[in-house]
Image: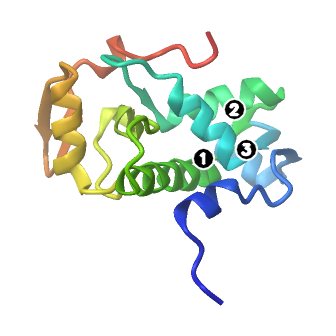
Amino acid sequence: MPKKTWNEKLRDNRGLPRVVTLSPKMARRWGGRTCAIPAPLEVRQLMRCVPKGMVTTVTEIRKAIARLHGADIGCPLTCGIFVWIVAHAANEDLQRGKRRITPYWRTLKAGGLLNPKYPGGVVVQRRLLEAEGHTIEKKGKQFRVKGFEHRLADLLA
C-alpha cells in the first residue's frame, strides 16, 4: 500500500472532532475534565487565520479548539501532531506549484520557539518570519520570536 501524502493525512479526520471526558489522572495532569480532539482541517483553518506580521502558538491553537468545542482543554498531542501535518501539507502544496499556502511558519511552539520539525527546520521558518518583520533571538540552543506575546493573532475573531 502506498504511503499517504501529507494532504491525504490532513483530510483523514478519523471521526474527529470529538470531546472526551478525561480520567481523573489526566484531568489533574492537563488541568481540565473535558478535552477537545480536533480534526486536522480545523487546526489548518486556525493556522490560516494568522495574518502577516502576527504569530500564534500551539498553546493558542489548543485554547481556540477548546473554546470551539466547549471543552476545558484542547488536546496537546493531536494539536501538536496536526500542526506538523499542516506544515508538511503546505510544503507539499508549494512543491506542486501552489502559490497560496497555509502560513505554517507563523505557528510557533510554546514560549515563541521556532519548530525544528517544520519543512526546512528553523532555518526556513526563521527566514520566512524575518521577511514578515519579526526579530529572531537565540535562547540557549533554540530560537524564538522576540516579543511574540505582543504579536499573537486572535484566532477566533
Instruction: Examine the image and state in which quarter residue 149 appears.
Output: top left
Label annotation for residue 148:
none
- Callout 1, which amino acid? Cys
Q: Secondary structure at mark 1?
A: helix
The residue depicted at 73 percent of the width and 47 percent of the height is 39
- Amino acid carrying mark 3 in the image: Pro
Q: Secondary structure at mark 3?
A: loop
Real-space Cα distance between discs 1 and 3?
A: 7 Å
The answer to whether marks 1 and 2 mark residues whose Cβ atoms lie closer than 8 Å is yes
The image quadrant that residue 116 belongs to is bottom left
Q: CA distance from mark 2 to mark 3?
A: 7 Å
Q: Tell whether 156 sits left or right of 127.
A: right
Above/below status of 139 relative to 40: above
x%, y% of residue 85?
A: 52, 56
Q: Which residue is mark 2?
A: 65
**Marks 1 and 3, the one that precedes in the sequence:** 3
Image position, residue 48 (x, y; %):
52, 29
Disc 3 marks which residue? 38
Look at the numbered disc 2 and give the secondary structure of its residue: helix
User: Residue type at mark 2?
Assistant: Ile
- Contact between marks 2 and 3 (CB within 8 A): the answer is yes
